Image: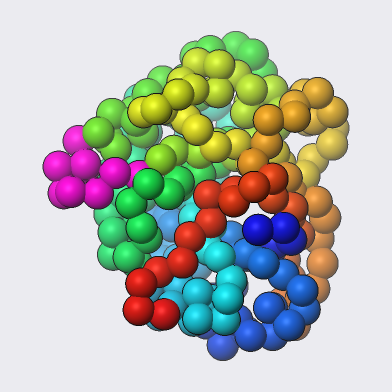
Amino acid sequence: MGRGLDTTVNCHSLARSIKEAGYDFVCRYYNRNNPGKNLTREEAEALSGAGLHVVAVWENGYPTSPDYFSYEAGKKDGRDAHRCARSVGQPAGTPIYFTVDYDASRADLSGAVNRYMRGVLDAFREEEAAGVRYDVGIYGSGLTCGSMLDAFGGSPGIRYAWLAESRGWSGYGKFEQWNIKQMAGATVAGIPVDTNIANGDGGGFKVEGA
């Protein structure tokens, strides 16, 4: 994986155009409140069949302030993300990124966000009873990514980090352990996207049967 994009738009019919535009991976969403932006099995197959990797990210509602985050919210989001991934056929051992979509303070990260991610990890351990183990990733500022890797790094734990585009957010220039780095907005294959680059595989996957 090298160049990628993330979008809320279903890319089923755009897969080959995205590949021909020079991209290697597409980041797509799981969520509960707006099912229309969710990655589907058919879309994942189309992307995989076009030679693109898929990256999964959970962003439900508005994770844009500490009010969103709690242990209970993490348990619910973790459970539902795990079930979305299984329904799509996401392969075991690949990550789902969870978004902290604001410039979280150190107090938020040691408090509400920490409790939320503990809930996610606990939910993943419980859902592994279904026979599939997924990894966990974090999306956010450099400070957010670094703090969560410090708190929960390892296996099982948070193993992937996706650095948000916002250069003004805390720790942007200092965080170097990113797996994916968000770059800038663009239009690709006629749809609005954010562009990204990956370091290594970035947690991308292809589904069987594509």
67 or 113, nearer to the observer: 113
Q: Does residue 29 appear to the left or right of 143 in the view shown? A: left
Residue 105 in the image, given as x and y percentages of width and height: 66, 18
Residue 144 in the image, given as x and y percentages of width and height: 63, 26
Q: Does residue 35 appear to the left or right of 151 in the view shown? A: left
180 or 51, nearer to the observer: 51
- Image quarter of residue 28: bottom right
Q: Is 110 situated above or below 17?
A: above
Magenta residue span: 126-134
Q: Is 63 situated above or below 203?
A: above
Q: Is 175 situated above or below 183?
A: above
Question: From this viewpoint, is residue 204 visible?
Answer: yes
- Does the magenta-highlighted stretch encompass residue 93? no
Residue lying furthest front: 200
Q: Quadrant of the N terminus?
A: bottom right
Residue 19 in the image, given as x and y percentages of width and height: 68, 78
Residue 89 in the image, given as x and y percentages of width and height: 32, 65
**Residue at 80% across, 51% down:** 183
Q: Quadrant of the C terminus?
A: bottom left
**Residue at 29% across, 44% down:** 133
Q: Is 54 situated above or below 100?
A: below
Q: How is the image coloured?
A: rainbow
**Residue at 45% across, 73% down:** 44
Numbered label tally: 0
**Residue at 53% across, 56% down:** 204
Question: From this viewpoint, is residue 70 visible?
Answer: no
Residue lying furthest left: 129
